[in-house]
Image: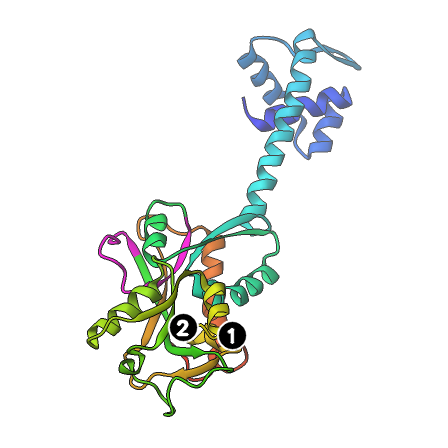
Amino acid sequence: MQLHQLRYFTAVAETRHFTRAAELLHVAQPSLSQQIRALERELGADLFHRARGNIALTDAGEALLPLARQILADAETAHREVQEVAQLRRGRVRLGATPSLCASFVPDVLRRFHDEFPGIELIVDEGGSQDLVRTLSAGELDLALIITPLPGQAPALAATELLREELVVASSPASPPPTRRRRILVEDLRDRPMVMFRRGYDLREFTTAVCRAAGFEPSFTVEGGEMDAVLGFVRAGLGIAVLPGMVAARSGLRITPFAGHDMQRTIAVAHRKDVAPPRAARELRRVMLEHLRTAAAGEFGLPPNTTRLLP
């Protein structure tokens, strides 16, 4: 049973005339009659009483007509739904991103994407890079913005590095600056009260590691916060914090850059190697790259001297 056969049958049933139905469908009348005969043979029953000048449905035809109309309507709905997804009028993208990127880079990218594709649903999963790698590997995300290098358990992922971001020390403008110099050293963090993120944040692991490499354990006055809480604690003067440059630039806090080039991180967009991202996700990735190129040209959003677009 073919859709065009049901379409021919429905047209004859509605016009009660083979020739007029053929004209309505822009097909030759013999071809239409032939296809309806083939449909009747497949179903094992006549669908029409055929008399000169009088075409009427048989009982079998009466039974088939509402079903044929429903099948044709469902086929049209399926075609329309698929076309809307294929043409990005509908669909969804599942994006994972670290909390610091959700607080800085991601909103501008999603706004730009939504302006271009308003019908695409955006689902954001916020978490640390290791959690996002696991979620992406399990097929629960289409793309993830993570901090590289990838952990060892992610051989099935492909990552494209986007930009390198400087880390800075943020402090309350109402408190004394953390150093009298223009730039601060990691050693200057020794014995200084610090506000620290909860476990699972990439920044917590990184800051702790560089302090230990410098020969000391960091001193925490408050720990366990999410990004907004850490910014609030610093603003209240409870301690300093090591923050990404993009977050710090929007925070209203005093920013002190580090000396040297070791205090930085690389941001990448990752996807599974074995499954091509859906078209909507590929378009989101394109928008990310275009946003970064525009930002690098100084037209948008990225703070100067804290980020560097990678080739």
Q: Residue tagged by mark 2?
A: 243
Q: Residues within 10 Å of mark 1 (few under 14, many from 20)?
A: some
Which is more N-terminal, label 1 or label 2? 2
Quadrant (top left/top right/bottom left/bottom right) for the C terminus: bottom left
Quadrant (top left/top right/bottom left/bottom right) for the N terminus: top right
Where does the image place residue 26, in percent across and percent down from the top left? 68, 35
64 drawn magenta? no
Where does the image place residue 280, in percent across and percent down from the top left? 50, 54
Front in this rendered view, residue 48 or 169: 169
The residues tagged by marks 2 and 1 sit, at their Cα atoms, a distance apart of 10 Å
- Above or below, 65 relative to 95: above
Q: Picture quarter containing residue 157? A: bottom left
156 drawn magenta? yes
Q: Is residue 83 left or right of residue 132?
A: right
Badge 2 marks a residue whose secondary structure is strand
Front in this rendered view, residue 273 or 148: 148
Residue kind at label 2, given as amino acid type: Leu
Where does the image place residue 304, in percent across and percent down from the top left? 46, 83
Residue in view at x 34 percent, y 85 percent: 184
Whether residue 104 appears in this view of the structure is no
Residue in view at x 34 percent, y 45 percent: 138
Residue range highlighted in magenta = 141-157
User: Which color mode does the image show?
Assistant: rainbow
Badge 1 marks a residue whose secondary structure is helix
Q: Is residue 219 left or right of residue 88?
A: left
- Labels 2 and 1 touching (C-beta < 8 A): yes
Q: Residue tagged by mark 1?
A: 251
- Above or below, 47 relative to 168: above
Residue kind at label 1, given as amino acid type: Ser
Residue in view at x 41 percent, y 74 percent: 239
